[in-house]
Image: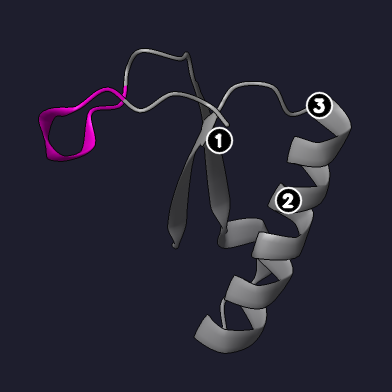
Amino acid sequence: MPFVKIDLFEGRSDEQKAQLAREVTEVVSRVAKAPKEAIHVFINDMPEGTYFPHGDIKKKN
C-alpha cells in the first residue's frame, strides 16, 4: 500500500492539487505495480514561515 506525501507552499488551487494527486497515482501504479485503489496521496499545504533549509527561513518566490 504506497503512501505518497507531497509538501508544497500553499497557493495551489484544489483543481491543481487534484490533478497532481491523479498523475502521481498513475505513475506510482505503473512503476510500483500497485493497484490505484491502494495508493494514498497526501498533499500538505505549508504556510510561509514554516520551512527553514539550512536554518534560514524560505520565502515563496
Q: Compute the Cα span from label 2 to label 3.
A: 10 Å
8 to the left or right of 58: right
User: Which residue type does callout 1 highlight?
Assistant: Ile
55 or 8: nearer the eye? 55
Q: Residue at x 35, y 28 (%)?
A: 58
Answer whether labels 2 and 1 touch (C-beta < 8 Å). Answer: yes
Secondary structure found at label 2: helix
- Circle 1: is it few (<14), some (14-19), or many (20+) Cα within 10 Å? some
Q: Which mark is residue 14?
A: 3
Q: Is residue 17 above or below residue 23?
A: above
Q: Could you say which quadrant of the image residue 55 lies in?
A: top left
Circle 3: residue type: Asp
Residue 43 locus on image (x, y percent)? 55, 35
Eyeballing the image, is 26 above or below 39?
below
- Picture quarter with the N terminus: bottom left
Counting from the top left corner in percent of width and height, residue 57 is at 27, 22
Does residue 27 sit above or below 50 in this rendering?
Answer: below
Seen in the image, is 16 located left or right of residue 44?
A: right
Q: Which residue is mark 1?
A: 43
Between residue 38 and residue 15, name the one nearer to us: 15
Query: Which range of residues does the magenta coloring cover?
Result: 51-57
The residue carrying mark 2 is 20
